[in-house]
Amino acid sequence: MALVDLVMPKLGESIMEATILKWHKQPGDSVSLDETVLEIATDKVDSEVPSTTAGVIEELLWNVNDVVPIGSVIARIRTGALESASPTPAPISATPAPSSPAPVQEAVVVETRPAPMPVPVSNANNGSNKFYSPLVLNIAASEGVGLAELETIPGSGNEGRVTKKDILQYVAQRGQRPAGNAQPVPTSTEMRVPLKQIEPSSSMPVPVASGNVEVVEMDRMRKLIAEHMVRSKQTSPHVTSFTEADVTNLVMWRDKCKKEFEKREGTKITFTPLFIEAIVRCIKKFPLINSSLEGHHILIKKDINIGMATALPSGNLIVPVIKNADQLNLVGLTKQVNQLADAARNGKLKVDDTQGGTFTLTNVGTFGSLMGTPIINQPQVAILAVGAIKKRPVVVETTSGDSIAIRHMMYLSMSYDHRIVDGSLGATFLTAVAKELENFNPERDF
């Protein structure tokens, strides 16, 4: 018999941790190969972790709601023990046991790197370089521990690194003495450090409200969305440009073809694949829009992967990604859009379905909005919003003169990272998308 470690699997390029939602197995339970052991959640989707071997659960090393780094040992399975007596269940430990081989160290990771790489945080006061994990930085920020103060904390980790235990112990002792001149930890835009969840013991206190007020705690996904929105605003200087497009030809074509399209292809055609088609054409003309920033380096993505913001029944949003959208025709885009939207609404998205996006489209017009100022989906540099299509009287220029006509008009807005995309490029790209929609060929086939 041997002990086999079950580790938190890698779930995507930018995902460095996951939250345990539910254990399906307990110490002493038998488990077969590929049988689900636990359910986990990331900032993208929920998924199940199967067993990598057959045997008996020896011990569970993390509790429900714990945030576990990718690659950490989460459970141990004793192989060849199915026919023998079950071992005495080991108590659940909040941290891996000391006997765990090569415990995974907390590391700050650049999002676009496939493997964890520590990122140095330099102290401008003394020129030293120390490494701090995202969790340590987040706890420090929430507790008002400045970077200079963080440098003074003795670390018990490898090479004197400050661990979660060290920072929590310091904060507890710090509260027993007069507070110093603590400053919030600045977030370096070059580090690309995602905000982390804090364990329930250090969560925000329940507010005490007076009057006729109902206090409702945010669900897990709403907390993650809130963290990502704040991080995006802290990371990228947002600029939003606006334009409008006469989409009469596009609307008339869809009205004419939608029944035949559904009959022939077995799926409905919405405006979304038509918008994506126009966006893809313009990205090919302006490739810098399809990029991300890592430190002082711009990563121009050769793959065009379009994320589409999708509303869930709970009211939350998720962004499934259409991979290699430039290689799909209109039928292929339509089927991808519908399949991903259905999977999102039914909770059947896979982890890979939300990974690798290079540009995002959000349709605020679905809910009746004329326009919006969307927040960039990090680490992308731009997001485009389309508003509701409304009939309006507009001036139409013809060879015989100007006239007023009733046209289908739509506002478009795009928020972009001003570190990379300046106003000229942002406005030019947005105008190009509008022109693509206006010049839609009403005689085209699908």
Image (cartoon, rainbow, N blue to C red):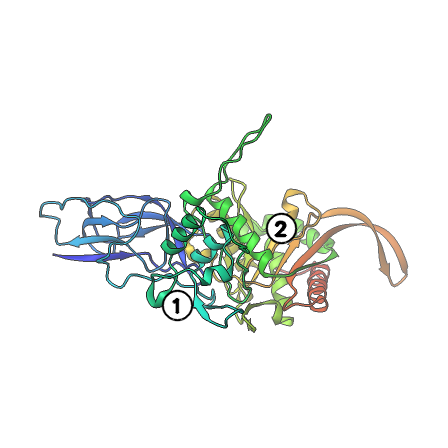
Q: In the rendering, at what x and y percent does residue 193 appear?
A: 49, 61
**Which corner quadrant holds the C terminus?**
bottom right
Residue 296: image tag:
none
**Which corner quadrant holds the N terminus?**
bottom left
Q: In the rendering, at what x and y percent does residue 13 appear?
A: 43, 63
Marks 2/1: CA distance?
34 Å
Q: Are marks 2 and 1 in contact (CB under 8 Å)?
A: no
Task: Give the amino acid type for the residue marked by disc 2 in the picture.
Answer: Asn
Vertical placement of 158 versus 64: above or below? below
Task: Give the amino acid type for the residue marked by disc 1 in the picture.
Answer: Ala
Residue beneath disc 2:
363
Tell me if 413 is positioned left or right of 123 in this view: right
Vertical placement of 276 versus 197: above or below? below
Tell me if 214 is positioned left or right of 15 in this view: right
Vertical placement of 273 versus 115: above or below? above
Q: In the rendering, at what x and y percent does residue 24 appear?
A: 28, 43
Most extreme residue toward the front, as rendered?
178
Which residue lies at the image location 72% right of the left edge and 53% below the top edge? Answer: 411
Q: Nearer the viewer, mark 2 or mark 1?
A: 1
Q: In the rendering, at what x and y percent does residue 239 appear?
A: 68, 60
Residue beneath disc 1:
115
